[in-house]
Amino acid sequence: MKKIIYFLILLLSIKTYSQSTDDQVCLDCHSDNTLTKKKNGKIISLFVDGKKFALSVHEDISCIGCHTDVDPENLPHPENLAKVNCGNCHDDKVKTVSNDIHHRLKVKNPPTCVSCHSNHEVKKPPLNNTAKVIEYCNKCHTDKILANNYHGKVVEKNNCLACHKKVDVKLTLPSSVHKNLQCADCHNYISNNLANHPKNVKHTQKADCYLCHSQIAKVHRESIHGISLSEGIDEAAMCWDCHGSHNIQKVKSEFSLVSPKNLASTCGKCHDNKDFQKKFDIGIKNPAASYTQSVHGKLLKNGNKDVPTCTSCHDVHNIKNKVQEGSTISPFNIPKLCGQCHKKESEEYTQSIHWIRAKKGFRESPVCSDCHSEHNIDAVNAKNKRDEAKKLQEQTCIVCHQNPMIARRFGHTGENAKLYQDSYHGLAVMRGDKDAAMCIDCHGVHKILPKNFSESSVSKENVKTTCQKCHKDATQVFSESYSHITQNKEAVKIESIVSNIYFWLIFSVIGAMVLHNLLIYLYEVKKKRNKLINDITIPRFTKNEVVQHYLLFISFITLAITGFALKYPNSWWSELLRNIGMTETVRQYIHRGAAIIMIITGLYHIGYLLFTARGRDVLFNLIPKWSDVIEARDNILYYLRINKERPKFDEYDYTEKAEYWALIWGTIVMGVTGLFLWFPTLVGNWAPVWLIKVSELIHFYEAILATLAIVVWHWFFVIFHPHEYPMSLTWIDGKMSLHTYRHHHEKHFRKVVLEWKEYKSGKRELKKVSNSTFLFTSTLEKNGLNPDVIINHEIENDPELKNWLDEKLNIAIN
């Protein structure tokens, strides 16, 4: 046994000595650090550091263990030796490497064993993946940050597709730019964890585009998308959200999701999504859809490939919001950005007062996007240029220059825009005159400067030339006479004197006219009133009904005035009410007090209709009937001069019935919605969320409807109707002349006559005589008149009435 052990020790000693001797023979030459050779025009060092080799993992392998074609007995060896085949020992690794991403993509000069491990100084690989990356991958991929198994586990496509059977993978991947990649090349996180195939993979772990696109990755990380992803916002855009997943095409391909024609819809998947906008409070709504409607979007749709797209303004990967450092859409960068295409306009703008102020940090000063919008940019079409200039003026120039906050900050009056609108130019433009001067005609489009700048188009030196564009014969004095505000102190004083003179002149002259005509009007009212006293009058309304009408009239007028005063607080009459003491608190109390009066009057009226004989009679006669439709038709035909006879109306004609029921409806609607608005917190405890706002709308529009109905309909029949001039006096005491009553309500008068005659002849019982007939006759008696005498007089002087009555009674009336 001892002999065997000694033999093995001797054999090992001989082998070690032999290896050492062979390696030393090689090092006799290769230890010379000046030893080189020339290959393919390059000088290659043949130096081997024996000490470092002794520390490598191959220290126990002799030189000829790798360089198998070297014969130590036949030295020096040939100059061009065969390439070392690491696969002699590392067959599994070599097979894996030959199928890695570098070789499958046919990368120029793909890495070999020596590229990563070196040749004679091979160290034992680190166990940690990140350390492997630092040791090997970082030799080429200096910006790479994600760890991956060095040789990578190759998962054949067919193996992945056994589970992942989505059609888009099978059909689209072969035609994509990644057709030569294996699943594991991109989905390395999953492939490296196949033993525990993760199901809930984080958004950023689904694929690793950064492995190959390291430079782009660095830019993307600094963008708003990359920063958001680092903060845990998975909705932020990763590579595949824009470029697609398995169907990625070359950027220049028309089928690419980021090609110019498809880019807006790709960006719009997120930025036009309502849920996305709401969750992340995206200020600009539907930017992609707006872009497609803009001049840029329309030109792109028509085939123009030179128009800007999303990436033209926002950059490709380095997308930042307005406030991020280096943002392309920062207000300070906008002129430069737009100037890439609109060079002339940009140069003019950067000489304007707007840019002078903007670059000093005054955000109120507009840049390109403030006037032209960001995405929905309209074309300056030569055909409709004036229309578009008017629109731009109204939506931009006027809005800013009329803003009191901006005016106060920059020391302006804030009235320049208003004074322009009140001038002939402004009024003519608002009326649609396309030749009248707009802002841009005098101040220019982009190079806008104040008049104290010598280059300004409205400076003293240039204003004459500016005016002569329209007024060919304009002089210097004429040109300086027009301005938004009067600059000359003497002119200001004269204008003030003239304004005051005319104010008092208008007040006194028109005031005198009003007083003069009011005197005539009151005289005619008094005259008509005196005539009515001497006429035979019959009751149109009872005293109770007159009082109800007074309360309704007062409360309605009060509600209309105090309600519209709130809706239109800047109107002259609303300001007048404020000046005489109607503050908002006072207005509230008056409005609500009037509302209470109207509601109480309405409730009383309901009781009056239901629980009094007169009320029931009124209600019965106010119920709409088919005959009202016939009478309305015949009345219209009469005034069109188609029918020769005017129809005869009952106690209430169709105009009065329509107005009455409209009043009932309006009172209920205004009362209910008014109470909702008066007590919103109580209503909010049980009502749906939209009820308060809808009640406000109904209250407002119903108020307009009711007010206009009173003015157009009611006041016409009681004031403006020629037959009623200067007004109907019935509303004062409820009385109406017998002549007027017969003119308006002949049908009802005949019913009264018929009922009275039947009652007097014994053909009608007392209880069957209507309330209105008793009211008619009793009023005559109270006035000292005999109803029989009055009725007989009317019959004798009206043959038509007499014949009608004879037919009804079948008796001769003497």
Image (tube, helix red, strand yellow):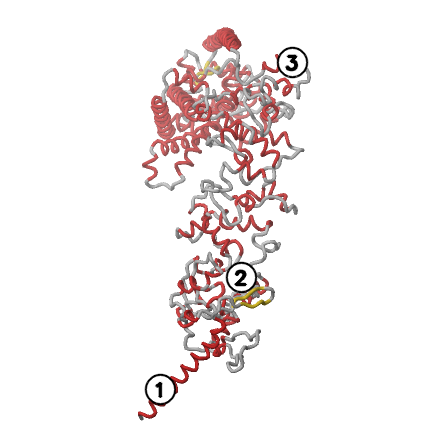
Residue 554 or residue 477, whichever sits in front: 477
Q: Which residue is mark 3?
A: 475
Q: Which residue is mark 1?
A: 9
* Residue 548: % across, % down: 38, 22
Residue 125 or residue 119, whichever sits in front: 119
Of circles 1 and 2, the one toward us is 1
SS type, badge 3: loop
3D distance between C-alphas at marks 3 and 1: 122 Å
SS type, badge 1: helix
3 or 1: tag closer to the N-terminus: 1
- Can I make out residue 801 in this image? no
- Number of residue marks: 3
SS type, badge 2: loop
Of circles 3 and 1, the one toward us is 1
Amino acid at the residue labelled 1 = Ile
3D distance between C-alphas at marks 3 and 2: 73 Å
Quadrant location of the N terminus in the rendered image: bottom left
Amino acid at the residue labelled 3 = Thr
Could you tell whether 284 is left or right of 633 in the image? left
